[in-house]
């Protein structure tokens, strides 16, 4: 195989490739990465960028990690893939056991799928099949939080924020769901009973048609990078129980330590009926997601008219992905992850605080290994990114949000280079 030079790759990319949420007629620049190691992305032209995105929440251990590389190589020499229908294997069995052990207590059944969005589809199907089995097939709507993001497939899109999501583009093709606002106060806000007015009313009036509430616990990611107080999550859990509605927690972004707890539900001490995991599950190596549910939900589904859960992806339980997920989880648990995330949080609080005084900045907020600088106006992605790249930093802002979620292994020095670059650039916005 001969390798292509940068110009050849760029030409092929521009001619043929879609990138996330991008145009093929007016494509924004795509930086050519040749290698990645630790927290560094190495560009074709020899420059290195410090990665503040962990490749969208995933690469929590950094890139090219010897332990994760070894786990994949070892599994590869046994088998890369084998169908999961009628066959099982050790990587999947071990992963299920690890996930059940780590997640809140009553979640003990695991469905493996290919990506976060698919795990949300699976969660929604579980909720609907559960209520069918209980003789309540009319319970098939979802209630979601405004400002939420749950993925790009159709059922997942239907529960994304109706304004910042894609509802206007696909109106008529999307299921019409219910939406309630989360508290606009931040993570630390004192309890306010008014938070429950809207969601409490909707649950009370629509309980007979609602299958589940779906939400991102504590941190709303791509829908606006907002944090809300644990007490609200606790209250929603209670409301769901009171009104006979399941709770689906989408921890695809928050899972595996990002907020400072292993799972964000732990902030509220609650357990959902159904839990979605993805992103950091494999340490950013391969695409894999998991939907966990309680025995009650699982037994309900299997006692229904179908007798089975009706989903089965081709690449379900892919052994390579499961093997690297197992290695990633073991690596995380063996690491001082709480101390690392606390150190990142403290440094982000200190070093991003001055941004709060810039005229273009609306708010700075930090939780765990997540730092957000919310601007007053949308930023021009290509311009801001070019300025960051010129300073050796990789971030991908969207809309009014400039945010960081670095690998947990980032050094204080590397993180300071990111916050310094941001400070220099955002002072002029
Ligand atoms: C990224 C994300 C998804 C979708 O996951 P994909 O792997 O991109 O399909 C769903 N929910 C949340 C909270 C996410 O952050």
Image: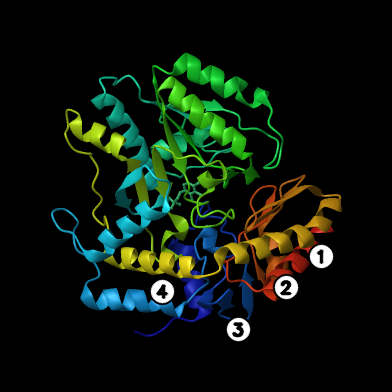
Q: Along the polypeptide, which appears first: circle 3 or circle 2? A: 3
Q: For mark 2, what is the residue?
A: 391
**Cα separation between marks 3 and 2:** 14 Å
Q: Residue furthest top?
A: 205
Q: Along the polypeptide, which appears first: circle 1 or circle 4? A: 4
Tell me: is circle 4 under 8 Å from ligand 1: no
Position of residue 163 measured from the top left corner of the image (x, y, whole percent):
58, 33
- Marks 4 and 2: in contact by CB < 8 Å? no
- Marks 2 and 1: in contact by CB < 8 Å? yes
Q: Along the polypeptide, which appears first: circle 2 or circle 4? A: 4
Residue visible at 48% across and 42% down in the picture:
150
Q: Along the polypeptide, which appears first: circle 1 or circle 2? A: 2
Q: Quadrant of residue 412?
A: bottom right
Q: The N terminus lies in which quarter of the figure?
A: bottom left
Q: For mark 4, what is the residue?
A: 68
Q: Helix, strand or loop at disc 4?
A: helix
Residue visible at 57% across and 56% down in the picture:
26
Q: Along the polypeptide, which appears first: circle 3 or circle 1? A: 3
User: Is 312 on the left or on the right of 422, as rendered?
Assistant: left
**Cα separation between marks 1 and 2:** 10 Å
Q: Which mark is residue 46?
A: 3
Q: For mark 1, what is the residue?
A: 424
Residue 52 appearing in the image: no
- Indicate which label's residue lies in the foreground, 1 or 4: 4
- Give the answer, above or below, for where 414 lies relative to 239: below
**Cα separation between marks 3 and 1:** 24 Å
């Amino acid at each position: 195989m001969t390798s292509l030079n940068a110009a050849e790759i760029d030409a092929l990319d521009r001619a043929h490739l879609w990138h996330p949420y991008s145009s093929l007629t007016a494509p924004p620049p795509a930086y050519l990465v040749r290698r990645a190691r630790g927290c560094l992305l190495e560009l074709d032209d020899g420059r290195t960028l410090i990665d503040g995105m962990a490749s969208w929440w995933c690469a929590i251990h950094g890139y090219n990690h010897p332990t994760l590389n070894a786990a994949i190589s070892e599994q590869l020499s046994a088998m890369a893939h084998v169908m999961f229908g009628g066959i099982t294997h050790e990587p999947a069995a071990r992963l299920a056991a690890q996930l059940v052990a780590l997640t809140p207590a009553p979640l003990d059944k695991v469905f493996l799928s290919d990506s976060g969005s698919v795990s949300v589809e699976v969660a929604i199907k579980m909720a609907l099949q559960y209520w069918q089995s209980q003789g309540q097939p009319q319970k098939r709507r979802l209630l979601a939080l405004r400002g939420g993001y749950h993925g790009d497939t159709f059922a997942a899109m239907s529960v994304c924020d109706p304004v910042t999501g894609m509802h206007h583009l696909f109106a008529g093709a999307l299921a019409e769901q219910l939406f309630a606002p989360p508290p606009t106060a931040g993570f630390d806000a004192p309890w306010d009973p008014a938070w429950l007015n809207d969601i409490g009313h909707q649950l009370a009036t629509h309980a007979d048609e609602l299958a589940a509430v779906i939400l991102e616990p504590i941190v709303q990611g791509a829908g606006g990078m907002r944090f809300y107080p644990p007490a609200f999550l606790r209250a929603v859990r209670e409301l769901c129980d009171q009104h006979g509605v399941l709770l689906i927690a989408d921890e695809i972004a928050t899972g595996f330590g990002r907020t400072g707890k292993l799972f964000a539900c732990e902030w509220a001490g609650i357990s959902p009926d159904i839990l979605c995991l993805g992103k950091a599950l494999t340490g950013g190596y391969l695409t894999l997601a998991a939907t966990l549910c309680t025995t009650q939900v699982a037994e309900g589904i299997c006692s229904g008219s179908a007798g089975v859960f009706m989903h089965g992806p081709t690449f379900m339980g892919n052994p390579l992905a499961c093997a690297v997920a197992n290695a990633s989880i073991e690596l995380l648990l063996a690491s001082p992850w709480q101390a690392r995330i606390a150190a990142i949080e403290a440094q982000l609080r200190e070093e991003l605080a001055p941004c709060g005084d810039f005229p273009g900045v609306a708010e700075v907020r930090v939780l765990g290994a997540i730092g957000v600088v919310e601007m007053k106006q949308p930023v021009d992605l290509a311009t801001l990114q070019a300025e960051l790249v010129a300073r050796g930093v990789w971030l991908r802002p969207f809309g009014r949000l400039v945010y960081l979620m670095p690998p947990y292994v980032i050094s204080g020095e590397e993180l300071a280079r990111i916050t310094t670059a941001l400070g220099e650039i955002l002072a002029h916005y």
